[in-house]
Image (tube, rainbow, N blue to C red):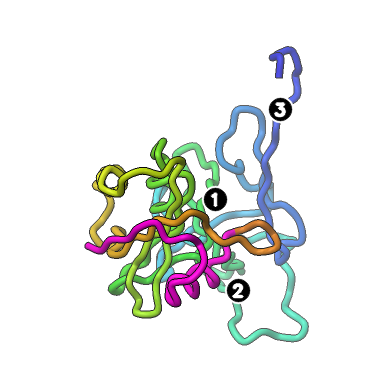
């Protein structure tokens, strides 16, 4: 902390299916670093085509420590073969920068499908929560498949300034990434692990109970 230590933080990445880390940062590297010798990454799009550098794609991992199979077998095999090389599809979305460093961005499982487009809730939440007025934001699909945003503010006041603040934060987003319904809450429900309980949040809003609904609006 005082700048006198020669120590530095290293960040690694790996999966259960790789048995161990497959990369780790060295001093000065960004993201989670470059693959270890013998390992390789392939980032693919929804059509399984390899994406160019600095583009997002699902992280696929090849290397000598890949597990052979699941016991018992699972219904959907996450292993693929490309040019006689076996890869594990991690369901993690990332990108590889121009220096060859891998950046892990979010889970594919967390994506929301809106009008045929995949939407990252984390991207929406990060933009909204970057406001000094917003304490927490959660993007989700309601039972009708409508993209919604629930949020808490750092102080209670009038709703119109909050509308403008959130609109300004999302103005650069693609139209399908802009929520249609907004819920201003006193608090976001948490589970026993202190993480956002999205199921309870949706249930409470559907039944209009809990959370302390302070206001709402639709586009």
Residue 79, numbered circle: 2
Q: On the rendered structure, is 90 left or right of 133?
A: right
- Asked whether residue 95 is drawn in magenta, I would say no
Where is mark 1, residue-wise? Answer: 104
Q: Is residue 114 visible?
A: yes
In the structure shown, which secondary structural element does the residue marked by tag 3 occupy?
A: loop
Q: Nearer the viewer, mark 2 or mark 1?
A: 1
Residue drawn at 38 percent across, 46 percent down: 127
Give the crowd class for mark 3: few <14, some 14-19, many >=20 residues within 10 Å: few
Residue drawn at 50 percent across, 58 percent down: 93
Give the crowd class for mark 2: few <14, some 14-19, many >=20 residues within 10 Å: some
Decide which of tag 1 and tag 3 comes sooner along the chain: 3
Residue 161: image quadrant is: top left
Q: Is residue 85 above or below residue 172?
A: below
Residue 15: image quadrant is: bottom right
Residue 196, x across and y down, in percent: 57, 60
- Asked whether residue 216 is drawn in magenta, I would say yes
* Mark 2 and mark 3 residues within 8 Å of each other at the beta carbon: no
Q: Nearer the viewer, mark 2 or mark 3?
A: 3
Where is mark 3, residue-wise? Answer: 8
In the structure shown, which secondary structural element does the residue marked by tag 2 occupy?
A: strand
Q: Is residue 1 above or below residue 43?
A: above
In the structure shown, which secondary structural element does the residue marked by tag 1 occupy?
A: strand
Distance, label 2 to label 3, CA atoms, is 35 Å
Q: On the rendered structure, is 48 left or right of 78?
A: left
Residue 99, x across and y down, in percent: 49, 37
Which region is colored magenta?
A: 196-219
């Amino acid at each position: 902390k005082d700048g006198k230590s020669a120590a530095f933080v290293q960040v690694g990445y790996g999966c259960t299916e790789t048995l161990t880390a497959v990369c780790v940062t060295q001093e000065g590297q960004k993201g989670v670093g470059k693959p270890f010798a013998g390992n390789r990454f392939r980032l693919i799009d929804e059509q399984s085509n390899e994406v160019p550098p600095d583009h997002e794609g699902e992280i696929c991992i090849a290397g000598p420590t890949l597990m052979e199979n699941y016991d018992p077998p699972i219904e959907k095999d996450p292993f693929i073969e490309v040019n006689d090389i076996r890869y594990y599809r991690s369901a993690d979305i990332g990108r590889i920068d121009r220096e060859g460093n891998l950046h892990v961005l979010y889970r594919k499982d967390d994506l929301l499908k809106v009008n045929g487009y995949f939407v990252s809730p984390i991207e929406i939440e990060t933009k909204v929560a970057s406001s000094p007025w917003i304490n927490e934001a959660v993007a989700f699909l309601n039972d009708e498949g409508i993209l919604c945003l629930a949020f808490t503010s750092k102080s209670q006041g009038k709703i119109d300034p909050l509308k403008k603040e959130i609109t300004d934060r999302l103005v650069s987003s693609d139209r399908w990434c802009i929520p249609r319904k907004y819920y201003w809450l006193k608090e976001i429900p948490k589970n026993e692990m202190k993480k956002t309980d999205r199921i309870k949040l949706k249930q409470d809003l559907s039944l209009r109970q809990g959370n302390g609904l302070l206001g709402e609006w639709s586009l």
